[in-house]
Amino acid sequence: MGSRRAQVLTSAGLRTAEDLLYYFPRRYLDRSTLVSIRDLIAHPGEVVTVIGGIGRINTVAGRRKRLIVTLSDGSGSMELVFFQGINYWQNAFAVGQMVAVSGEVQFYGRKASMVHPDIDRLQEGDTLEFINTGGIIPVYPSNAELEKVGLNRHGGFRRLMHHVLQRFLGAVRDWFTPDFLAGHHLMPLRDALEIIHRPPDNEQLEHARRRLIFDEFFMLSLQLAVRRRRQGTALPGIAFGAESPTARRLVEQLPFELTGAQKRVLHEIVGDMRTGHPMNRLLQGDVGSGKTVVALLSMLLAVDNGYQCALMVPTEILAEQHFRSITTIVDDLSVNIQLLTGQQAAGKKNPLLAAVANGDVDIVVGTHALIQETVQFHRLGLVVIDEQHRFGVTQRAQLRSKGSTPDVLVMTATPIPRTLSMTLYGDLDVSVIDELPANRKQVKTAIRFDEDRENVYVFIRGEVERGNQAYIVFPLVSESEKLDLKAATEEYESLKEAVFPDLRLGLLHGQMKSDEKDAVMMRFKRRELDILVSTTVIEVGVDIPDATVMVIEHAERFGLAQLHQLRGRVGRSDKQAWCILMTTKRMYFAGRGKSTDEQKQISDLRRRLDTMRDSTDGFHIAEVDMEIRGPGDLWGTQQHGYPAFRIANLLEHGDILQEARDEAFRIIESDPQLRKKEHRGIRELLGPRIRRHLSMADIS
Ligand code: ADP
Ligand code: MG
């Protein structure tokens, strides 16, 4: 091809024939969803494709300015409606041009319309082929630069792919053996790559997709399996003895019985600790599910075996909280537990560091300070990391390097859908506490509007008079932001002066210094404050048993994961707790007469609030979150280096993921170096591609 075209392709990341073979169509125009305009009357509300010529292009003033484009196909005419980007769309069309439009069919009167449809400009030949042969026509992702060199998402790319397939398909070799393919009902790679670009029919297209999705999951899983071996099963670790008299005594002393789920995960952890390989386990459990006591019992096992433990948390206040609660629990068990924070003065800290280095200290609780160079352990055996999404990869690696190869238990209260956790934490073993202690009352959640505000205040006052405390959370700190968000600071002043002049209110926000924040939090904890007005900084796992009310202002602005985390701040005792989601009727009930984008936003926010009202199950909430936002946008996944799939989708392809993953782990377990004859293709062909295609950040 010409050098200009080659240059544009290169800057789009398409350098080699292989890059192009793996440049999959974004979607397909399929005759089976093609409808003539006259027949649209039979498909209201459905998403269909129409091919036609552009007629009139008009802007219409009115309650909302919009662009109306008439489309005709010989059987009738319809309207394409645009509310946004009017100038752009006005110039994008030329009268008489042939386009294929896909979108939801709406009717206002007898006239069919589509709002912001997907549009493909067609060339003469395409249209004829499409209509005459009834084939499935691929539509490629393109952009302005590519279009300039003739690579529009339709004909241009298709012709290029035609050449690439002809010239290079023969060079494609499969990394899987015919037996392997047969065993997993997979199509040969060469066929799959041809069909994905030139599908003869839908059935074969599905089959080709399945093969390519399998490959993507397999590549990822293979990488995870290798990493898991490298940092776990292949390394020598500490084989702890199973007996821990101290842990046994603690279980007897606890004022409660461990839940079935706590016993089960403890069993899994102890099982890991007894093997001669380092543990790499993730402990997932919703807020309040009792992860701390599980971690503590595991640490006592290590201590009884003569090892030291480190418990690492994200903030100083959490470190103190953990330290206090743990020391109370193990009060008379003669275990030496110490708190190490960044704020301790050197005079106090130096002897402490010495005691850690000579082995006098059994358990060290702390923040990032724990992984500083100055902290040397005598015999570090177990590292527990709480609220792990706050910790970066390197920090974990650093801490791990403190001991030879200590066992590592990471704990998170962020529930993650199973398919996502298989990809994010695929190299960790996962334990899940899926049961709350029996004495726990479910937090009751309600949605309230501005009109109900007086009642909400009366309710808060009632709870405070009963000896309880309340949070009122705002999404922002200062009113400089757009829209009508009430800044926490201003609202705090008016709540204090006008609404609750007789109560004790405190303010907490992200722009305060961390010792100021800690001071306010401690006052709330010590019951010197009745109501804490705050931005989202209280998100982390601070335990205030008397807090029974969580009011979230502008709840529609928060993501589901965040709402769930915030709600988890209340209901941490046997008292009934309440979560009140404040929003406006305008937001909650709106929707009519808006563009599809806006309608989707509104229905998403309503779905978020309804989900919170109807469920307290963190895993269910996480699934809904993934459905609404897509896995790539889930809270915290960015910093984990969530892999970008080309064709696979965690929401839809969970079963293929499971199959590919099982197979990858089985292969690496039985043949870690991929030396066996049947694995040679995987090593030679897939190995280099894994390095090239998946630049996934190191995730553990
Ligand atoms: P999280 O999983 O959020 O870290 P915690 O470990 O802080 O939860 O436990 C929350 C509270 O529940 C603590 O006060 C703890 O003592 C208590 N708890 C833990 N396990 C049980 C149980 N099996 N029965 C009753 N209460 C429990
Ligand atoms: Mg906790």
Image (cartoon, grey):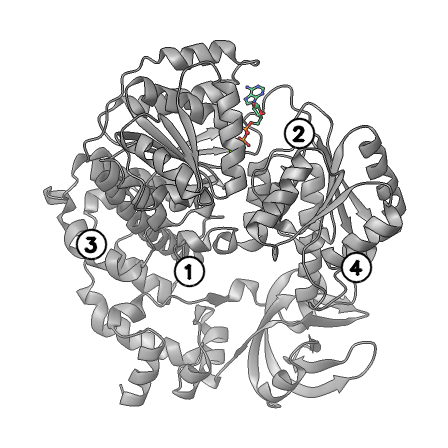
Specify few, some or many for label 1: CA neighbours under 10 Å numbering under 14, 14-19, or 20 or more: few
* Disc 4 target residue: 590
At mark 3, the secondary structure is helix
Judge from the rendering whether residue 26 lies leftward or rightward of residue 463; answer left or right. left
Q: Is residue 362 above or below residue 223?
A: above
* Disc 3 target residue: 687
Residue in the picture at 18% in, 31% down:
236
Q: Is residue 174 above or below residue 225?
A: below
Residue in the picture at 31% in, 44% down:
374
Mark found first going from the N terminus, 1 or 3 = 1
At mark 4, the secondary structure is loop
Q: Residue furthest front?
A: 347
- How far apart are labels 2 and 4 at the CA level? 38 Å
* Disc 2 target residue: 545
Amino acid on which the number 2 mark rests in the picture:
Pro
* Disc 1 target residue: 201
- How far apart are labels 4 and 1 at the CA level? 42 Å
Q: Is residue 379 visible?
A: yes
Q: Position of residue 635 (x, y in %)?
A: 52, 51
Residue in the picture at 74% in, 51% down:
553
Q: Is residue 299 above or below residue 342?
A: above
Q: Quadrant of the N terminus?
A: bottom left
